[in-house]
């Protein structure tokens, strides 16, 4: 059974979620981790775990796009959300210097606070990186850090992936691994120990080939996993078991 380790179910209309989960189950996808991104989707992210306790777990936090919104009230909301039984991580957190929707200093401040929260609460983290690797790895490597979690939809090179693993994190592989011009991602994936790999859709974004350009869905994590297995020359069922076990080892979902 596959697990989609990163899917934004809150970005679908609520009326669509039942069908998305049914299609995922039909495709052999046992569970999904849904990360929060901002103030407005935090409560709904937690609510999904209550509505679908057998197949959905959540991460709670603030995406770097919304880092400037992390005020005292939102901090308290995130801290309270961590007490919900279906919440298994702090996320989606990190840095994004592509759009710069929040200033760099706000992103760094938000990232550090959420990393500290995860350490204090003994939760793993779900980390976002886009065009920010130098600062991201600097923060992750700060001497007082004690990390566990995943760098999701990772696109850096083999050396960066090795550093991620060295720091105690898993590497998330998304549908970008199937893209025609993604030789660098495939090379990076080939360098990984499979005990440190997760697969994800990042839906509704990054639909894999042959669905590229469509709105992504969790059922297609199977396409990503089978493609990755073929690329690595391993049995797809064995990769499904391994990535499943990796997810359970990291996030300990109560399924």
Image (cartoon, helix red, strand yellow):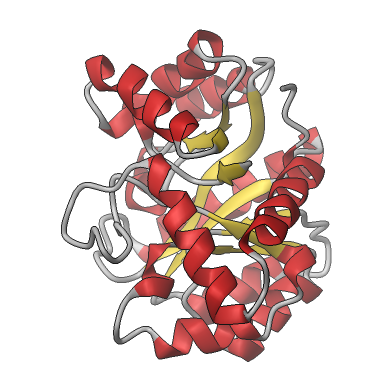
> Closer to the camera, 1 or 92?
1
Q: State which quadrant residue 58 falls in.
A: top right
Q: Nearer the viewer, residue 208 or 137?
A: 208
Q: Position of residue 118 (x, y in %)?
A: 71, 41
Tell me which corner region of the image, top left, top right, bottom left or bottom right, holds residue 39. Answer: top left
Image position of 26 (left or right of 212) = right
Measured along the vertical axis of the image, is residue 173 above or below residue 127? Answer: below
Quadrant where the C terminus is found in the figure: top right
Residue 71 in sight in this render: no
Q: Which residue is nearer to you in this view: 212 or 92?
A: 212
Q: Is residue 180 visible?
A: yes
The answer to whether residue 63 is left or right of residue 80 is left
Q: Residue at x 43, y 73 (%)?
A: 177
Q: Residue at x 69, y 17 (%)?
A: 83
Residue 36 lies, in percent from the top left, at 45, 34
Q: Residue furthest left?
A: 213
User: How many numbered tags mark residues here?
Assistant: 0
Which residue shows up at 75% across the image and 52% down it? 246
Residue 240: x, y in percent?
A: 65, 53
Q: Is residue 247 above or below residue 192?
A: above
Q: Position of residue 197 (x, y in %)?
A: 67, 64
């Amino acid at each position: 059974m596959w697990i989609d380790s990163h899917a934004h179910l809150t970005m679908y209309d609520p009326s669509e979620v039942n069908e998305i989960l049914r299609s995922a189950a039909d495709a052999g996808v046992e569970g999904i981790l849904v990360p929060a991104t901002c103030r407005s989707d935090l409560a709904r992210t937690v609510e999904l775990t209550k509505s679908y306790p057998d197949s959905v777990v959540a991460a709670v936090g603030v995406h770097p796009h919304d880092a400037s919104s992390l005020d005292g009230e939102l901090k308290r909301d995130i801290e309270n959300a961590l007490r919900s039984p279906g919440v298994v991580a702090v996320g989606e957190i990190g840095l994004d210097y592509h759009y710069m929707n929040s200033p760099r200093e706000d992103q760094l401040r938000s990232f550090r606070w959420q990393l500290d929260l995860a350490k204090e609460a003994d939760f793993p983290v779900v980390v976002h990186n886009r065009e920010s690797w130098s600062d991201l790895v600097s923060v992750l490597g700060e001497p007082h850090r004690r990390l566990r979690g995943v760098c999701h939809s990772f696109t850096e090179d083999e050396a960066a992936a090795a550093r991620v693993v060295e720091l105690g994190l898993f590497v998330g592989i998304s549908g970008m691994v199937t893209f025609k011009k993604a030789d660098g991602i495939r090379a990076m994936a080939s360098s990984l120990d499979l005990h440190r790999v997760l697969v994800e859709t990042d839906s509704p974004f990054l639909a894999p080939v042959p669905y590229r350009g469509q709105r992504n869905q969790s059922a297609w994590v199977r396409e990503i996993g089978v493609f990755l297995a073929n690329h690595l020359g391993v049995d797809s069922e064995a990769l499904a078991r391994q990535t499943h076990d990796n997810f359970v080892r990291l996030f300990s979902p109560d399924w």
